[in-house]
Amino acid sequence: MTSTNLLVQKCICSFCGRSQEPHEKFYTNGHARMMLAKHVDYVRICPECTGLALTGVLSPMALFVDPSTHKQTPESIEGYLSRTVVGQDDAKRMLAIAAWQHMHRRSLPEARRSHLPKNNVLIIGPTGTGKTLMLETLAQLLDVPMVTFDTSTVTKAGYVGAKAEQCVYNLIAAAGSLEKAEFGIIHLDEVDKIRRMRGLDGDVGGEAAQQSFLKILEGMTLLVERMNKESKVEKVPFSTKNILFVATGAFPDLYEKHSQAGRSSAIGFTADYTKGSGPVLTEVTSEQLTAFGMISEFTRRLPSIALMQPLAVADLANIIRLSTHSPVEQYSQMLATMGVETEWCSDFIEEVARRAHAKHLGASGIASVLEHSFRDLLFTLPGLVHRHGGKLKLTFTAEFLDDGKPHIDTGTATASGDVHT
Ligand SMILES: Nc1ncnc2c1ncn2[C@@H]1O[C@H](COP(=O)(O)OP(=O)(O)O)[C@@H](O)[C@H]1O
Ligand SMILES: [Mg+2]
C-alpha cells in the first residue's frame, strides 16, 4: 500500500497528523492539492487545527497557542484566561490544570481514559470576582459547549422545582448533539445555596439537592430523547462520565470567619489601594466545607478547589486598564465604531474603581458606576458625530462621573465638552 492510499483510507489531518475518529468530520478541499514527499493528496484539516487556524487569523490569541504541538498546555490556557481575567492567579492555574486534563482525556482512546481520574472543580469566591467570566473564557478557548445551571433551583423529590438531571439536558440542548455534549462543561452555580441547613420546621434543606447531584458528578448514564433519521423520537443512553463539572459559590461564611482572624491582602500592583480588599483565603479544608453545610460525598466529587480573592480598589483599577472584557474597553470599542477616539485619564479610572468598590458587587460594580453617566452621553453623542461629520476625540476625567460631560476635541478647537451643543 502506498502512503497516498494510507492517507486516503485513514484520513489524517495534514496539519497535525492525527487520524480521524469515527464521529468526527475532517474538512477537505476537493480541489486544492498539496505535494507530500513523492505523492499528491487532498489537504485535510481536523476540527482542532481549524480552530487554531481561525484563531491565528482572527485574534492575537495565537500568541498563547503552543506552536510546537498545536495543543493547549496548562500554561497556554492560563495565559489565555489572563487576557480577560485579571488577578486570581491561583484559581486560573488550578482551572488550567483541570481543563488541560479534561482535553487530555478527550484525546485518549476510551480504554485508556479510565486510568485517569475525573477531575471536577469547585471554585469558591465572592460575587463579581470573575468565576463565570473565567469559565466562559475557558469554554471559548477549548471550543466546547458550556451551560450554567443554578443549583439552588433544585428541590427535593415531591416538590415543584428543577431536577438535577436538567443540567445535563441543558448541555445537550446547547451543544446541539450528544457527541459535542459528551466533553462539555457544566457550570453548577450557587452550590453554597444548597448547603445543609435545618429549617424552621426542623426539616434539613439542601442535603437532598446535593445528593441528587452525586451520581451525575461521578458519571451516570441517562436516557435522552432524540430524533432518529426517520424523524421518530428514540431514547439513547448518554453518560456524564466525561463532562467537566465546575461548581461555584460565594461561601460567605468562609471569608467572614477568615476576616475575623484579621488577615488581609490583595492582587494587583498598586500597593496604596490594597486597603479594604477583604480577607484573602489561601486554603479551604474539607472540614470547613462540611461545617459550612456541604456533605462530604458532594465535595469529594469536586477534588480540585480553586479560591478566588475579593477585589480591592487597585484590582478594580487593573481590571479597567487591562481586561479585554472591561466595560471601559467595551465603551472604547463601541465609540470607535462611530469614529470617536477615546482617552481615559488615570483619575477617571481610579474614581470608577473607588465608586465600584463601594458598591460591594466586585467587578460588576464597574458597569453600574459607568452606566448612568454613559446613558446621557450615548443619547446625545450620535447626533453630535452626525453634525460634526469628522473625527472626534473624547477625554474622560473623574468629573465625567458627576456631570456626564467628557472633554471633546473636534480636531479644530478644544472645548470642555457639552455634547448638547
Ligand atoms: N478578575 C476579573 N477580571 C476581569 N473582569 C472581572 C473579574 N472579575 C469580575 N470581572 C467583571 O465583572 C463581571 C462579573 O463577573 P462574574 O464572572 O460574573 O462574577 P462571579 O461569577 O464571580 O460572580 C464580569 O463580566 C467581568 O466584566
Ligand atoms: Mg457567576
Image (tube, rainbow, N blue to C red):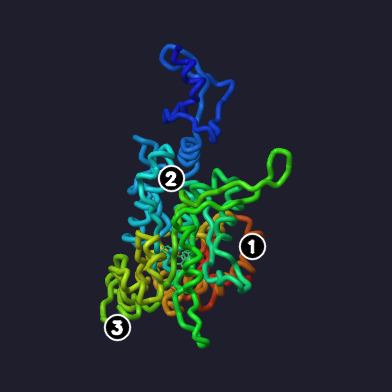
State the residue in front, 108 or 338.
Answer: 108
Amino acid type at image mark 2: Pro
The quadrant in which the C terminus is found is bottom right
Residue 107, located in which quarter of the rendered image? top left
Between circles 1 and 2, the one closer to the viewer is 2
> What residue would you read off at disc 1?
382
Q: Does 257 sit above or below residue 347?
A: below
State the residue in front, 173 or 241.
Answer: 241
Between circles 1 and 3, the one closer to the viewer is 3
Left or right of 73 in this view: 36: right
Q: Does 137 sit above or below residue 252?
A: above
Estimate the x, y position of residue 311 in percent, counting from the top left: 37, 71
The answer as to whether callout 2 falls within 8 Å of ligand 1 is no
> What residue would you read off at disc 3?
260
Estimate the x, y position of residue 327 in percent, counting from the top left: 50, 64
Is residue 63 visible to us here? Answer: no
Estimate the x, y position of residue 38 in percent, counting from the top left: 43, 11
> What residue would you read off at disc 2?
60
